[in-house]
Amino acid sequence: MKRRNVLKGAGVLAAVAVTGGLRAHADSLPQPERPRGLARGLTVLNIRHNGTYVLAVKTEKGILIVPEAAKSLRVHAPADVDELLQNEDGPLLNSLVDAALKSNSARSAFVKEEGIGYGPVVTRPEKIVCIGLNYRKHAQETGQPVPKKPILFNKYNTTLNYHNGTIKLPVEVATKFDYEVELVIVMGKTARNVSEADALSCVAGYCTGNDFTARDLQYETGGQWMIGKTPDQFAPLGPYMVTADQIDPDNLKLECRANGETRQSSNTSDMVFNSRQIISYISRHITLKPGDIIFTGTPEGVIQGKPKDKQVWLKPGDKIACSLEKLGELKFDLV
């Protein structure tokens, strides 16, 4: 009975890792419902491992491959970031990471970051919602009024891309390619008609993203924002998702560099609608679910905002690097 009580909390992982003696017996015991909630104090990512994307955590010992750690500790773990979010398995992941850091049996689950292949931070969100013209100076540089309400558009899962990835430019249908560094919100709880005061409690974490755009498709085909934003691979995310408890999303420096030249440099404090307002507004119209992501808008410095005689559009061979304070640098190449 005492052992059964031990299994009632996510702290079982630490006990298993330290003692090793519960492993065989634990498999035969009734498994109570796991506690649900958001992960805290972690930097998580999807990596390519054995032909698929799997959940990993960046730690002081290196990158922890979560399924490998779970196998060593003989416990359950979410397979990837999407499963972590959609099942609200944050407490379980926190306990597993704590156990792996203390256990000798999980040593082989740690690898050096230099050797991993990154995946998109999420791979199957139900919704990708984007906010247009959400920085005051960006609206000004493009000659458009500052919005009175958030402007919403969308991307699709086929746009998802990753750190150190490539975008194959669709040169057969477009030529005016542009960068847009953005803070990306990753939802961790269902939000429907959520108040601004409660909005951030629904967030699992934040990551660096780029709302890559074909401006000629966006503006020169009848104002089709969606088609200018949704070609394949046009939504790089990464390298990591940093859990929400560690981040003030409305005071982060963000930059974009093209071939080493800084093109965008601003702070999320310049957003017209802050993170709370964005989540609350969207949730009044669309139910947000765990794993959904929100691109929150880009600051000034885009190619579209330059005088026409100085608009040098991106081309194959260009290298893009985007960074957000505390969230890491996202790099990708154009081919």
Image (tube, rainbow, N blue to C red):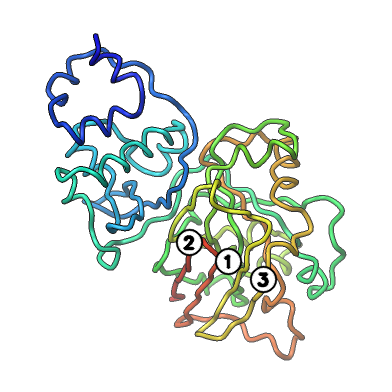
Pointer 2 and pointer 3: residues touching (CB < 8 Å)? Answer: no
Pointer 2 and pointer 1: residues touching (CB < 8 Å)? Answer: yes
Q: Residues within 10 Å of mark 2 (few under 14, many from 20)?
A: many
Which label number is shown at residue 63? none
In the figure, residue 142 lies in which quadrant? bottom right
SS for tag 3? helix
SS for tag 2? loop
Q: CA distance from mark 3 to mark 1?
A: 9 Å
Residue 176's spot in the image, x, y percent? 62, 76
Which label number is shown at residue 215? 3
Q: Residue at x 50, y 72 (%)?
A: 169
Q: Residue at x 36, y 23 (%)?
A: 9
Amino acid type, mark 2:
Gln
Mark 1 lies on residue: 212
In the figure, residue 4 lies in which quadrant? top left
Quadrant into which the C terminus falls: bottom left
Mark 2 lies on residue: 233
* Among the two numbered marks 2 and 3 on one chain, the one whose residue lies closer to the N terminus: 3
Amino acid type, mark 1:
Phe
Q: CA distance from mark 2 to mark 3?
A: 16 Å
